[in-house]
Structures are given as C-alpha cells and as structure tokens.
Image (cartoon, rainbow, N blue to C red):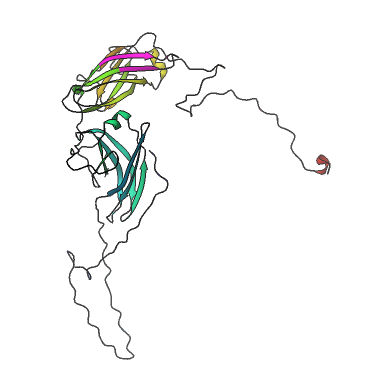
Amino acid sequence: MMRKDKRRVRALGVLVLGCAVVWGPGCKKQEPAAVASLDAGVAPVAVAVRDAGPVAEVRKPLRFSGVTFAYKDDDLKVSYTLDNPGTAQGRGQTCLWLHDDKGVVIDTLTLGVFSLKGGTSDTFQDHPTVARKFWKQARSVQLFTTTSYCQRSPPEVTSEMLHVLTTGQPVPPGGPAPRNVEEAQVEDFALSNVELSQDEEGTGYFITYTVKNLSGRRASGTACLRAYTGEGCPCHVEETLSGEFSLPAGGSETIKDQIFFDDEKHWDDVKVLRLFASATGCGDAADATNVGFKIDKPDAFREPRELTDVAGEPELDPDNPDAVVDVPDERPVEEDEPYSDSPEDTGH
C-alpha cells in the first residue's frame, strides 16, 4: 500500500454554543442577573460563574470527494479526499468493492487505514493490486470506511457508501443497485484438466487447470495447492495459493500459475498434491466436502535446480532484487604504516 506523503488538511471552525445562547435538551433558561448600582468607593463583589460542562463529541458519517481511478499492470491507483464533518476523531480503514454489470461483488479490497480529526479533511492515494480480469469485468465500485473488516457482509460502515463508475463518475440513474457479498460454496466450483509442468531451465514448476462455476450466480474464489508425502498422510507439508477467479453463472476459466514452496527441498519428499477451490482458498481446510483434485507428482519433479550464470555463480532473481547471494570473503587488506605529519616524516 502506498500513500501520498503530502496531505492537505482543512480545519473547520467549531462553534460551541452554551445554554445561555441555545436552549437545548437539559438546558434551563435563566433570568438575566440584575445589575446593582454601586455606591462610590464601594468595591464590586465578584460574581461566581459556573464553567460549562464537557461538550459531547458528535459523530457524523465521513464523506468522500475527488475520487479518481487509474489502472495499469495490475496496479490500481485510487485517489480520494475524506472529510470528517463531526467533532469526534474518525479512525478505521477504507474499503473498495468491485461490482459487475448486475451489481454483484467481484472482489473486495482494503485500501488503507486512516485517522482523521473532527472538522478536518485529508487526501489519500492508495495502490491496491487488482487482477486485470477483475478490473475488466467491473462496471462500478463502492467506497466506504469501517472499523471492522472490508470483507464483512453486510458491511459496518462509518461513512457514506459512495457508488461510482470505474471512471469515478456518478452511476447513472436506473443502473443496477450494488449488492452485498455473496460467499461462494465449495460445491459451486468444478476443477478439471489439472496438469503440472516444468520450465525449460528446470528451475520452476507450474500448475494449469480449468475451473467452472456450477452455480446459478456469480462465484468468486481462490485455488489452494497442498502437497503431501503420501496418499494416506492427513497433514500437508506445503500449501500455496494458486490463482484467483470470479466467474459468472456457468462461466469457466483456464488458469496457469507458478508453484512456490516455502522449502523447495520438499519436492523430493512429496508424492501427492491436491488442488482445492473455495471462497477463501487455503483459508478452508480439507474435509469430506472438499477433498480436492488429486495429482500424482511425477518422479522427475525433484528439488528445482539453481539457475547459474556462465561463471557458475547463482543468478540474482529478477523478481527479487533483494535476494542475498553468498560471496567469498575477500582477503584482508594489509594496513599501511600509520600516517604522520611530523617534520621527520614529511621533510617539512
């Protein structure tokens, strides 16, 4: 997540009105005190005035303005201004829901956290990752803030629910109303044509599969690949997310994704892999209703070899420039004689 460093804050003046000006609930009208004439030479008597009690903080829904979207290479730049019209501190996180042409939720995103004083506004810029296939299906979005989590349905909102097109423009009248999240069930998905493959260099493995939505409504989910050391072993030694999808009723998609193990040496021990599809991917455990699609690992699939350059040194991963490569220690440099600026040494 990325935020603008420069933020604009506009302070709004807050006028506190006491009971003497406005008779609100619990306020009692008091008669004005009579002004006593003072004789010359008589000191005035101090009149005690009771301090007003603490003013209750007022919470009002936050408001959005200046919303814009820019999409490129799976990066969605979302810019917006939040205004806090109340007097209470506003805290929470900003959420974005993608909706299709029927108003159904495609994906739910968490943009970022915020803290906004009462009577102020602040401008934010967030960069969530959005799959291109999701953004292409989206016709409108909803923006809101919450103190809960963005996937909650129905959402617990602390702001207005701003419904706009993916261009940031208002949704025209008569368009489909946005719906809440409808969580997919395991039985909504069918997996087929599952294959494992290896790249030409033998340095990485991939999984290809087709997922179909068997339900009569849109279903969104994630695949999870689990690896086992044997058919009867109940515990997996590795699990990794293997693609996400959002399919209309009866729709299907073929997905290819690279397989990443936390420990690549496990490829030598793994005998069986199973691919699962559900609403939360690896968040759902394997059980009798979701046994997964079984894949027998080919014997040739061992620990991937390390890619080396022509000099025999390990190559840096272009996708991970921070990767550490062991470099032989250099021979210590012999120290020169201590420097001295005395006349005997410099000749001056």
Compared to residue 45, the image places residue 188 above or below, namely: above
- Magenta stretch contains residue 203: yes
Q: Quadrant of the C terminus?
A: top right
Q: Residue at x 39, y 9 (%)?
A: 300
Q: Quadrant of residue 31?
A: bottom left
Foreground of the two, 93 or 32: 93
Please identify the dominant SS of the magenta region.
strand
* Furthest residue toward left: 216
Q: Quadrant of residue 128?
A: top left
Point out residue 314 in the picture as x, y percentages from the top left corner.
Answer: 52, 20
Q: Is residue 122 left or right of residue 178?
A: right
Instruction: Please state the extent of the stretch shown in magenta in the rendering.
Output: 192-208
Q: Quadrant of the N terminus?
A: top left
Point out residue 347 in the picture as x, y percentages from the top left corner.
Answer: 84, 41
Question: Could you tell me how many numbered marks the image carries?
Answer: 0
Q: Is residue 209 left or right of residue 343?
A: left
- Magenta stretch contains residue 205: yes
Foreground of the two, 315 or 88: 315
Compared to residue 315, the image places residue 157 above or below, namely: below
Q: Residue at x 74, y 39 (%)?
A: 339
Point out residue 154 in the picture as x, y percentages from the top left corner.
Answer: 19, 39
